[in-house]
Amino acid sequence: MTPDLASPSHHRWYEDVFAILIGTTLVSLGIAFYAEAQLTTGSSAGLALLLQYITGIPFGWLFFAINLPFYFLAFLRMGLPFTLKTVASVAIVSGFSGQISGWIDIGSINPLFAALVGGGLMGLGILSLFRHKASVGGINILALYLQENFGIRAGYFQLGVDAVILVIAFFVLPFDRVIYSILGALVLNMIIALNHRPGRYVGFS
């Protein structure tokens, strides 16, 4: 019997858990690539990376703190289940990002490779979270809200915000590292823009 691909299917709780673990692992690995190559990205993760380079404070602590103000918007606009899954996702990324260096030894990494592959990993991870009604906080929350309520593509909105953060990066990082970061941001956001849109995926949580 051929399944009805046009009919939405409800995600079971264990499917949500699995998707969140996979998504946060991919995001954390992408961040590890970026941190090793001294790159940055957009949204709250990019801001946390820049602050880590400036202050020396670990990424995980900064990332968790930056996302705190966005949970109220998530609760008001996206509901309690989305908020709880997002809090869990941010906490996992914050924790994993500090542990990956003990799990994998990245002696050196080509910055262009880090930008493209790291951006791809983060894009796929965020896409996994989006499709299970979760996010990694920050601007992702606002991007999802605008898409679901006003039809503004999450990826395109995120790209605009990322552009502002990457301009700031010119004052913090070497020129070539910012250029690589821009390429990575394009990969990340195109993955979301091309794959997370109405009608492209019919599962829901």
Image (spheres, rainbow, N blue to C red):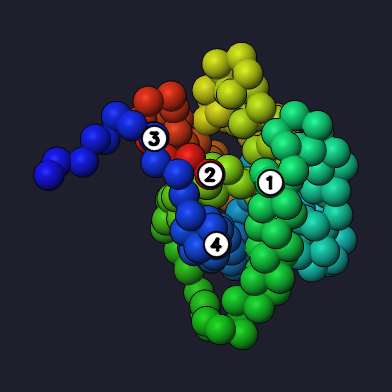
Q: Position of residue 143 (x, y in %)?
A: 64, 29
CA–CA distance between discs 4 and 2? 11 Å
Left or right: where 160 falls relative to 118: right
Q: Position of residue 9 (x, y in %)?
A: 39, 41
Disc 4 versus disc 3: nearer the observer: 3
Nearest to N terminus: mark 4 or mark 3: 3
Mark sitting on residue 205: 2
Nearest to N terminus: mark 2 or mark 3: 3
Of the residues shown, which amino acid type is indicated by label 3? Pro
Nearest to N terminus: mark 1 or mark 4: 4
Nearest to N terminus: mark 2 or mark 1: 1
Under circle 2, the secondary element is: loop
Under circle 1, the secondary element is: helix
Q: Label 4: which residue?
A: 17
Please tell me which residue is depicted at 73% across the width and 62% down the height of the picture: 91
Under circle 4, the secondary element is: helix
Q: Label 3: which residue?
A: 8
Q: Are marks 2 and 1 in contact (CB under 8 Å)?
A: yes
